Amino acid sequence: MTNKQILEIALRQSAEDNGCSAEDFLSDKNVVVPFKLGEKARKYYKEPITCNFVTYGNNVVAATSDEVADIVKEYVAKFEFDHCFETPNLNWLSERLEKLGHKVCFMAEYFLPDLDKMPELECPYATKILGPEDFKELYLPQWSNALCSARKELDALGIGAYDGEKLVGFAGASADCDDMWQIGVDVLPEYRRNGIASALTNNLAKEILKRGKVPFYCCAWSNIRSAKNAIRSGFTPSWVEVTVKPTEVVDRLNA
């Protein structure tokens, strides 16, 4: 697999997630399309989704419901595409959406592996490849980034770091769609800052690639520690998303 093939797979997946074409993300003009969650969309995408803004660094693709389509079209025409993902411009959008019962909900940055810069990282502790049969006793708060108790059936692969018999770090991969698996990683607090997270992330990514899948990594824009881990592990920033949902959904998340 090459970097070009990895990007093509990611673009096709984003198109499936939003109801557009992969080529839309490569245009030098902003694109607005009706939002449609495809049959092969990432499994953690749940409707209702009012609209979704995506950029791979060329433009903004906005997939929107009919209810807010006029606001979305005005928004992407008013601001430069990269400014559509930052304040104070998001405040302009939010003020108009709230009048119709919608709010900005999720903001995230996504990373893809850069095969030309994928380092060889060794973990300071012994490691072991783990499969779903090993996960049964690991659905615990300390491993909540590596595994998802709400979607256990998607947890496909993992790698653990052990201090003797003690699991001290764990990276897990979720089969969120047919061709792309998402990596999450956790390290016990007393074992952090010694290279465990990056080594586990890096080696799990390679195991995923061996299986013919594309590893990807996601974090909030403000999670500097997580973003640094992605970069140290051989990943590069690839796309960002802002998702709008009905107000009652957002308020429920804040309850």
Image (cartoon, rainbow, N blue to C red):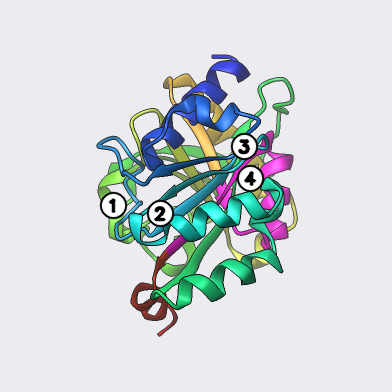
Evaluate whether residue 208 shows in this view. Answer: no
Vertical placement of residue 208 versus 53, above or below: above
User: Which x, y percent locates residue 75?
Assistant: 59, 57
Disc ID at residue 152: 1
Per the image, the residue denoted by label 4 is 125
- Mark-to-mark CA distance, 4 and 2: 21 Å
Among numbered discs 4 and 2, the one appearing first in the sequence: 4
- Mark-to-mark CA distance, 4 and 3: 36 Å
Secondary-structure class at tag 2: loop
Secondary-structure class at tag 3: loop
Kindly indicate whether the residue at mark 2 contacts the one at mark 1 (C-beta within 8 angstroms). yes
Identify the amino acid type marked 2.
Answer: Leu
Task: Please report the residue visible at 36 percent of the width from the left and 79 percent of the height from the top.
Answer: 252
User: Which x, y percent locates residue 82?
Assistant: 70, 48
Among numbered discs 4 and 1, the one appearing first in the sequence: 4
Among numbered discs 1 and 2, the one appearing first in the sequence: 2
